[in-house]
Amino acid sequence: PIKRSTVGRAACIPEYIVYTDEMTWDDAKAACESSSWTLAEIRSQAQRDALKAILPAENNNYWIGVNDVVGDNENYEYATGGSVIYTNWLNYEPNNHNGAAEDCVELRGKKGYGWNDTPCDRKKFPLCEF
Ligand code: GN1
Ligand code: CA
């Protein structure tokens, strides 16, 4: 037989949708799942670049499927499981600002859609992928 070896699977570019109501992180996760989607996880620079090119121009803030709820030790995990393999933190983030529990991750529109940790009960627009 012809010899071959596995080189792995590159992160592809998912399809994205946003919901037009702001909601808590838990509700955003449920909203995506209600359509059999998941909160966007953004696993590569290529995904981030693709997303930035298509997000609405309104500078909104979006929930993504990343948090450090488990253990709360700045150990960021995907909502679908596993430790993060790519991050795009804004300068000085994540910071649990003013000692608050900032356990969920948003994309900040006014800052180029970089990542910020922020309290999970804040209301943001869900960003889902499939
Ligand atoms: C925000 O709102 P402000 O400036 O106190 C943000 C923090 C960020 C900080 C960065 C609730 O805090 O998470 O680390 O900006 N607060 C919220 O300057 O998202
Ligand atoms: Ca923060």
Image: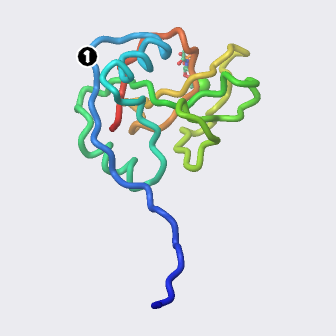
**Closest to the observer: 55 or 82?**
82
Q: Position of residue 68 (x, y in %)?
A: 66, 27
**Closest to the observer: 37 or 120?**
37
Residue at 28% x, 26% y is 18
Amino acid tagged 1: Thr
**Closest to the observer: 92 or 40?**
40
Displayed quadrant of residue 91: top right
Ligand 2 is found in which quarter of the picture?
top right
Q: Position of residue 7 (x, y in %)?
A: 52, 72
Label 1, on which residue? 20
Residue at 54% x, 38% y is 90
Q: Position of residue 58 (x, y in %)?
A: 25, 26
Q: Residues within 10 Å of mark 1 (few under 14, many from 20)?
A: few
Disc 1 element? loop
Q: Position of residue 69 (x, y in %)?
A: 66, 22
- Where 96 sits versus 122, above or below? below
Residue at 38% x, 50% y is 47
Identify the residue at the far front of this view.
1
Horizontal side, residue 123 vs residue 19: left or right: right
Identify the residue at the far bottom of this view.
2
Horizontal side, residue 96 vs residue 22: left or right: right
**Closest to the observer: 94 or 11?**
11
Horizontal side, residue 94 vs residue 57: left or right: right
Quadrant, the C terminus: top left
- Where 130 sits versus 24, above or below? below
Coloring scheme used: rainbow
Horizontal side, residue 112 vs residue 5: left or right: left
